[in-house]
Amino acid sequence: MSINTSPPSGTRDFLPADLARRRHLEGVIRRVYESFGFVALETPAFENLSTLLGKYGDEGDQLLFRLLHRRDKLARALQEPGVGEKDLADLGLRYDLTVPLARVIANAKDLPRFFKRYQIQPVWRADRPGKGRYREFWQCDIDITGTTSLVAEAEVCGAVVRVFEELGVRDITIALNHRQLLRCLIQAAGLPPAQEETALVAIDKLDKIGLDGVRKEFTTRGIEATAGERLLTLITRPPEGSSPSPAGPRPPTSPAIEGKGPADGEAGAQLPPTADHRAATADHRAAARADHRAEVAELDRLAGLLADVPEAAGPLAQLRELLDIAAGSAAGPYLRIDATLARGLGYYTGPIFEIRSPAFRGSLGGGGRYDGLIGMFKGTAIPAVGFSIGFERLLLVMEERGLFGSVSWGPDVLLCRFPDVAPADALRTASALRQAGLKVEVFPETPKIGKQFAYAESIKVKLAAILGATEAQEGKLSVKHLGTGEQLTLPLAAAIARLREWSKAG
Amino acid sequence: MSINTSPPSGTRDFLPADLARRRHLEGVIRRVYESFGFVALETPAFENLSTLLGKYGDEGDQLLFRLLHRRDKLARALQEPGVGEKDLADLGLRYDLTVPLARVIANAKDLPRFFKRYQIQPVWRADRPGKGRYREFWQCDIDITGTTSLVAEAEVCGAVVRVFEELGVRDITIALNHRQLLRCLIQAAGLPPAQEETALVAIDKLDKIGLDGVRKEFTTRGIEATAGERLLTLITRPPEGSSPSPAGPRPPTSPAIEGKGPADGEAGAQLPPTADHRAATADHRAAARADHRAEVAELDRLAGLLADVPEAAGPLAQLRELLDIAAGSAAGPYLRIDATLARGLGYYTGPIFEIRSPAFRGSLGGGGRYDGLIGMFKGTAIPAVGFSIGFERLLLVMEERGLFGSVSWGPDVLLCRFPDVAPADALRTASALRQAGLKVEVFPETPKIGKQFAYAESIKVKLAAILGATEAQEGKLSVKHLGTGEQLTLPLAAAIARLREWSKAG
């Protein structure tokens, strides 16, 4: 037959071994988020298109999966002359977890004044699938709504850092910038206000296309070359211990992929190519991290550049305050001011952040403050700040580094029986084992015992319980450790105890 | 503003308290399934339409959500004359978890010979939404593939029974029938073979529309009245202790809703209307349950009716054997032969089952053997049997009966501070509490402490930690139990210990 049995392009089946790792990772994220006081929210897979459209930019709108109208509604639509996409659907699969949150905040009654929610669910984007780029992928978001206090920024960054620390991925930094500060820098470079947006979009591509690429983007977007060069100089952080320098090559390890939301479906294709590259990068990171004074110095440098821009005072003060507050949190040692950080999404209004590691070319997550989005649904503004971990990328880093260790899954024991044992007796024995906390698979047929053992090994089960007619009559059970070959026949209770011992010993 | 912020029709936002109950239920189901040796599988939200179409019957095909083509593909489709639904989509949201499993079995390499998988994921059906009827709802499936041994039937039934026992929903029965047996009964009633399918569909509606409704269905479907009446007599089980009787009224508590898969989105509207009704029903159930001999007697009755139908011997022998095997499993006491059970889905080939309770008008789950479905994908047949719990309905029963007790969620402690405390100090204290295993929310602002306490109470947090400037300097912390009013100031370590004590005491 020629039936296609692969999952649809850009999606994956998660078999038990994969799923065990995914669940382990999700469990750590969930536990850390909850320790920070975040509570769980889940929203439907699809939303009204009116909820989704116009929140992610044109490119985002293009990547929405839309649900086709049905029956009469479809028939009517198809009869209209010039029928198009917008006439054929009014529902779409969710594209991220932030917009659904904003809708829920506007809709739900009795939410706490500060709603600290986490949400770990798949999102869907009709991106061109490719290696490590999925159409269905998971996001792990935390957000705090209802306060403009920078304690919220420090807490979301702290929670994300704790996740990475718990998982053993410690060579990270959190790039920190401020949307308004970046706008001030664009202004200071001499670009007209009308070019702010387009300059932002170009800068956001820096990590993908490099400095020369951004220069070309500037040209394409009609940005005057001198002003563009001035901007690149302004935002580029001088090397540690040097005086401010013109835009030099940027380390290749801090590319932002975004333009697509706080985390996305790209992964494998972005891994650093060589070990040398990685080592060089790690050095750079080590040098770059953890010096609070260096971060304050970078803010001083930017303040100096922006002395004539009164609008810069606010964002600069906020970043200073955030560095102070975060010094008391897990995030403190990881924050690094980076004026080149732009973040693709339109809705950010304040501090923005992105988590980076030499383990991965591209951000492992990101977020920021968005004080306007909820108001688009609610009418009255509600401030909010969020951070999203890119689940697929983090998983990839963990796998690359062997950080999962042995995540166990599957049954502990295979219950085998001889053909002269009634299956009811086997099931009775299985019940006893299960009640003792063991995970037990019953071999459903009765080929030779050796074949049953071979099956146990094929599914990586190390322990077998073997029921013969004599044992069944005498209330006994044979147990065998398939790893060591040790085998003995014991009264049922003792047999269960032995299986539990073996099982706990791994 | 007039923006609609409700979730789309037929879907729900799950706020933290709802989600805590759903997770608790899911956790029990997962644990029991794993104790039976089932391993987890997850599949994509959408499938190729070629995978889904033709598996659920016409009504099912109509209820698929299809994903609209995009860009060029859509433009090309819209230019064709007479463009219709089938030209506009080739992907659809999954409708159940069984068909995706069949596809995976056909596709995946290296699956165990007996693949025992569980899958707990949402499915989507474009049903007319109504009270308790959802377009997005969860199914909890277990299936065993690769064996025709009836041990598999006993195991899936046993696992489902253990879930219900663990949850405290013990007034259940598992209705048991056999597809081929039902076909033999239809034949024995004198219906022509060509009417088997349509008679099955009519009988499947018995619980929805009652005997008179089925009689009308028979007429509509061109089934001759005498033969139809004969069929109803054959399949109706005589009351306990009586001789076979003509079709009498069936207790109103065993309606099958199906025609839609092993479990579905309907729920609340199906609850029994009155307590009296419930009590009467419970009596009926109690009388009906647990007598192995009575079940064998019913099989004897059916065997007598089918003495002239040679094809009946096989299915009757299978049901006898299944009763014997299951006597050794948790399912034993709950199995009840019910020749009226039809199950709507076309793919069943052997034993079929449905879980019923007086707590709910409609099945709480169901399943059966389907030895042909996987072959539709793989080319070669692979036998399989499965059981699915209706998550939404079980949840409703648990809520109605108050079986959730107090599922806890949310932070343990709200960390409050006076305005003269640096936020960094508060975050440092929060870190210490979190490292001790407490879930801690930090109040992000500094209004009067009374307001901070009021917020704690509004989010049902019972414990407060209060940081003043003096405490911060002296390494101390005030802790307050907002339930009892007890408050004391202690060195940090002692304060943490006290909070943990309070937290553990609930």
Image: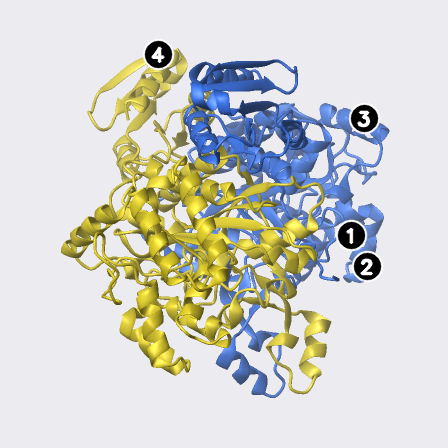
Chain colours: A blue, B yellow
Vertical order, A480 against A23 (above or below) = above
Q: Between marks 4 and 1, how big is the CA–CA gap?
A: 58 Å
Pick whichever, A93 or A284, lies toward us.
A93
Q: In the rendered image, which residue does mark 1 sit on? A: A228
Say which element carries label 1: helix
**Towards the viewer: B103 or B458:** B103
Q: Chain of mark 3?
A: A
Report whether A59 appears left or right of B253.
right
Pointer 4: residues within 10 angstroms few (<14), some, or many (20+)? Answer: few
Return the disc, 3 or 2, that comes first in the chain's sequence: 2
Task: Tell which circle, 1 or 3, labels the residue nearer the N-terminal end.
Answer: 1
Q: Tell which tag, 4 or 2, sits nearer the viewer.
A: 4
Identify residue type, mark 4. Answer: Ala
Q: Pointer 4: what residue?
A: B494
Asked if labels 4 and 3 touch by Cβ distance under 8 angstroms, the answer is no
Q: Which label is found at residue B11?
A: none
Q: Earlier in the sequence, mark 1 or mark 2?
A: 2
Question: Distance between the Cα atoms at labels 3 and 4?
Answer: 45 Å
Label 4 residue SS: helix
Mark pair 4, 2: CA separation? 64 Å
Q: Chain of mark 4?
A: B
* Real-space CA distance between mark 3 and mark 2, rounded to the nearest whole angstrom: 35 Å
> Which residue carries the number 3 mark?
A279
Q: Which residue is mark 2?
A: A219
Q: Secondary structure at mark 3?
A: helix
Per the model, the C-alpha gap separating discs 1 and 2 is: 9 Å
Labels 3, 2: front one: 3
